[in-house]
């Protein structure tokens, strides 16, 4: 047996592995993730490395392959577990080991430590004062200023001395030589700024919350480690339950990962956790600098941080004593990776927890059908919160408004008459409104009224979206162009924007309510660092009356003064080419409705739609998850979609259309050959919903079977065959389990 070993996992090029022979005496001790010592380089100096793959295949001349020297003591480290996770991702999701390693070891390049220079006094306060007086007599004004300042404090930042006291390196050097001061450097951690006072005591839990927290604690004390689904209505106090669970885990000296679906949720979530647990809380996300992310991972390794909060990538925090993983809003699509390996954080968390003998808690007001069906089947332990946590808080009153009737009555505005009236009422009362529109931009597309042609992206199979300032933008590849005055196809001047986005809603709102203070929150307004935090802080502080946004505003936020939520176009997510579109619509609408009336003030939710009879909209209006689940599962059972059936999607992409067609036909044939006696349903190949993105063509092949392991075998067979195909290296293939 041979081991492929990475010598330095902190290096940027983690794909550089070296092969060593495993001596018979070590065969039982070495597995993927094991930390070993190996002779490295011409001198054969012993270096430490991690085993990333075991193989019987020699990759070099047998005589040149050296032997593994030994297994390191305490070889199971946080990094070794993450390498085991990488191997699992590779096997399950069909990625290369390099892709998997880059996923689980996100901070690959060591970042130079941040240092600050300090001037420290070496004398007593009295001696320093005398030295300052002597400097004044000799007219050394700069020296006098510094020494007088050092009588008040033992150290001064070097930058302050230079910029504010007008000192130079030349004037500081003789003072240091005389032993009056010391010039020092201090390494500081680039920590995220958390402007909040820690140390708040836990809130008083209601009966439902207390029962759940007590049951979890009792089971944890008995050593029971399992996956729990915490299903609670919006505003039921899931976060308070999480914090009680975390307290129990911290008491045992273990660590916690809290996943949140979007950076937009970081602000309020972190504030609540920091007030409760103080400096052991940290955050990590993609908007942080490489230095900030590196420092947080180092703090986690050292044990300084014990609770890490962040989106999907926070799952790979190198904790050595991980005791609990919490996935808040577990139904969110953000937990599914869109790049290879196309892993789901929920499944990966369960595997990682198993390695660490830790528990997993999934929380949601609208659980994914996969999680809820597993809870009903007994695979997850189900906890329910059936009422809102605050005694005076009631579920908002929901009204569905039929936009067809509005049109019949002559109202062509995006705002129904009832919504306009309700917004005026809130402005008069000094209360806040949230308007949800799941499309950014000014208009959804620009089209010619003469020939009917829409202006499309030259690189993608989509129409361009009109943004403010007559700018057309592709939301897939980023292509931008000025909106034309005439139709590019027929030359007609009758060309205009159709549809509505958040920018257009903002403009219409300001025209209709000129006295209102309006904020907009979407990908455009939150692109800069801390953009989410600034907008949410301003709204929470009452600096705006109306917040307009995409789905990022309807998830998990808690604003006591919001008493009205308007959903402007509930149908937008209902007719997408995804078998989960009904589920997504129900979840979005239920979450949006949950933002209103979360405190003493009663809330109202107005859902505008052209299809009020649809069960997703009807059940969301009634906040009735069980009815939605029952109806949706009927369709999933009939059509053979998850969770009723397992489904593997093979996604192939290539810049050459003919080569792509040849590749997917080959894979279709291999799937049929390998299925043998198994009744595997093969659908396709078919063009992807968006066939061309950034000049790359895309096709899909769908494979369905009740047994997940059979689909894994099929995936492995197709991977092996594709490595031998003529088109290998030209066609990118990804495997995605729905």
Image (spheres, rainbow, N blue to C red):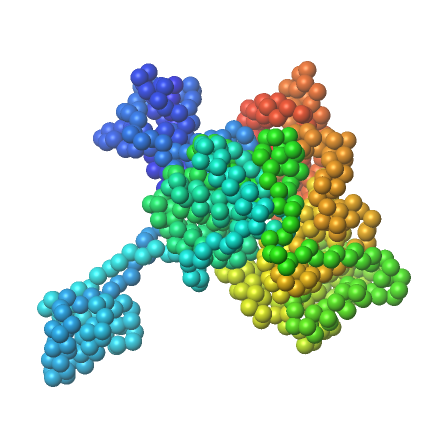
- In this view of the protein, which residue sits in the foreground, 702 or 505? 505
Question: Would residue 352 appear left or right of 280 to someone viewing this image?
Answer: right
Image point (32%, 20%), residue name: 26
Where residue 101 sits in the image (x, y, percent)?
45, 37
Find residue 375 and report its horizontal and vertical position in percent. Answer: 62, 34
The residue sitting at 17% across, 68% down in the picture is 121
Residue at 79 percent of width and 65 percent of height: 418
Q: In which quarter of the image is the C terminus?
A: top right
**Residue 251 position in % (x across, y down):** 40, 43
Q: Is residue 99 left or right of 585 when viewed as pictured?
A: left
- Rendered position, 336 above or below 713: below
Name the image quarter holding the N terminus: top left
Residue lying furthest right in this view?
Answer: 408
Q: Quadrant of residue 382?
A: top right
* Vertical relation: 567 (above or below) 145: above
Work out which residue is located at the far front of the displayed protein and give it.
207
Q: Is 170 drawn above or below residue 17 in the view shown? A: below
Which residue is located at x 12 percent, y 76 percent?
131
Decide which of 45, 233 is in the foreground and name it: 233
Residue 591 visible in the picture: yes
Count how many numbered circles sit on residues in the image.
0
Give the x, y percent position of residue 595.
Answer: 64, 57
- Image quadrant in which you'd find residue 602: bottom right
Q: In this view, does 20 lie to the left or right of 408?
A: left
The residue closer to the viewer here, 456 or 27, is 27
Q: In this view, does 422 lie above or below 35?
A: below
Residue 289 visible in the picture: no
């Amino acid at each position: 047996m041979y081991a492929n070993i990475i010598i330095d996992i902190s290096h940027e090029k983690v794909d550089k592995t070296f092969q060593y022979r495993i001596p018979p005496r070590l065969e039982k001790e070495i597995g993927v993730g094991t930390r070993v010592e190996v002779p490295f380089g011409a001198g054969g100096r012993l270096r430490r490395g991690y085993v990333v793959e075991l193989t019987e295949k020699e990759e070099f001349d047998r005589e040149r392959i050296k032997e593994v020297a030994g297994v390191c003591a305490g070889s199971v480290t946080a990094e070794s577990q993450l390498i085991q996770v990488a191997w699992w991702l590779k096997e399950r999701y069909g990625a290369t080991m390099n892709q998997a390693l880059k996923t689980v070891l996100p901070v690959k390049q060591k970042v130079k430590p941040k240092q600050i220079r300090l001037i420290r006094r070496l004398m007593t306060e009295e001696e320093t004062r005398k030295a300052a007086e002597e400097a004044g007599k000799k007219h050394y004004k700069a020296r006098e200023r510094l020494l007088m300042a050092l009588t008040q404090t033992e150290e001064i930042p070097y930058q302050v001395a230079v910029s504010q006291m007008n000192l130079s390196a030349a004037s500081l050097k003789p003072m240091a030589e005389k032993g009056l001061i010391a010039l020092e450097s201090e390494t500081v951690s680039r920590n995220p700024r958390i402007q909040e006072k820690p140390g708040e005591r836990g809130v008083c839990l209601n009966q439902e919350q207390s029962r759940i927290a007590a049951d979890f604690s009792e089971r944890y004390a008995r050593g029971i480690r399992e996956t729990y689904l915490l299903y609670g209505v919006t505003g039921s106090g899931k976060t308070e339950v999480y914090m009680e669970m975390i307290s129990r885990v911290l008491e045992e000296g273990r660590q916690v990962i809290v996943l949140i679906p979007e950076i937009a949720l970081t602000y309020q979530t972190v504030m609540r956790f920091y007030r409760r647990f103080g400096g052991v809380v940290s955050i990590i996300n993609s908007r942080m600098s490489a230095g900030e992310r590196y420092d947080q991972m180092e703090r986690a390794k050292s044990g300084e941080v014990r609770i890490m909060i962040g989106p999907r990538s926070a799952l790979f925090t190198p904790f050595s004593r991980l005791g609990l993983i919490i996935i808040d809003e577990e139904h969110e699509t953000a937990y599914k990776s869109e790049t290879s390996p196309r892993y789901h954080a929920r499944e990966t968390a369960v595997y990682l927890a198993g390695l660490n003998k830790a528990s997993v808690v999934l929380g949601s007001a609208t659980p994914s059908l996969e999680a809820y069906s597993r809870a009903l089947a007994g695979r997850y332990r189900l906890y329910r919160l059936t009422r809102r946590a605050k005694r005076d808080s009631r579920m908002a009153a929901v009204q569905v408004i039929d936009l067809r009737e509005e049109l019949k009555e002559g109202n062509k505005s995006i705002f129904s008459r009832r919504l306009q009236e309700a917004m005026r009422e809130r402005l008069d009362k000094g209360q806040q409104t949230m308007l949800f529109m799941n499309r950014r931009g000014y208009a959804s597309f620009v089209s010619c009224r003469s020939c009917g042609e829409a202006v499309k992206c030259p690189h993608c199979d989509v129409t361009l979206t009109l943004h403010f300032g007559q700018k057309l933008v592709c939301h897939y590849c980023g292509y931008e162009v000025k909106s034309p005055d005439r139709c590019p196809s027929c030359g007609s001047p009758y060309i205009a924007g159709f549809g509505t986005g958040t920018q257009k809603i903002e403009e219409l709102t300001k025209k209709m309510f000129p006295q209102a203070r309006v904020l907009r929150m979407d990908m455009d307004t939150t692109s800069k660092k801390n953009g989410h935090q600034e907008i949410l802080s301003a709204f929470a502080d009452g600096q705006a009356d109306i917040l307009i946004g995409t789905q990022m505003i309807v998830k998990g936020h808690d604003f006591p003064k919001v008493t009205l939520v308007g959903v402007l176009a509930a149908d937008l997510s209902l007719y997408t080419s995804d078998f989960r579109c009904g589920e997504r619509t129900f979840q979005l609408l239920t979450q949006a409705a949950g933002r209103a009336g979360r405190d003493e003030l009663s809330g109202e939710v107005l859902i505008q739609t052209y299809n009020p009879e649809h069960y997703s909209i009807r059940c969301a209006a009634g906040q009735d998850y069980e009815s939605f689940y029952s109806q949706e599962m009927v369709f999933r059972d009939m059509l053979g979609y998850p969770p009723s059936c397992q489904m593997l999607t093979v996604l192939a992409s290539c810049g050459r259309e003919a080569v792509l067609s040849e590749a997917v036909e080959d894979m279709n044939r291999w799937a049929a050959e390998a299925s043998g006696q198994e009744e595997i349903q093969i659908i396709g190949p078919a063009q992807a919903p968006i066939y061309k993105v950034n000049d790359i063509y895309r096709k899909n092949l769908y494979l369905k079977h009740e047994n997940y392991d059979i689909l894994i075998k099929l995936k492995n067979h197709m991977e092996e065959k594709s490595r031998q195909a003529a088109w290998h290296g030209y066609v990118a293939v990804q495997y995605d389990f729905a």
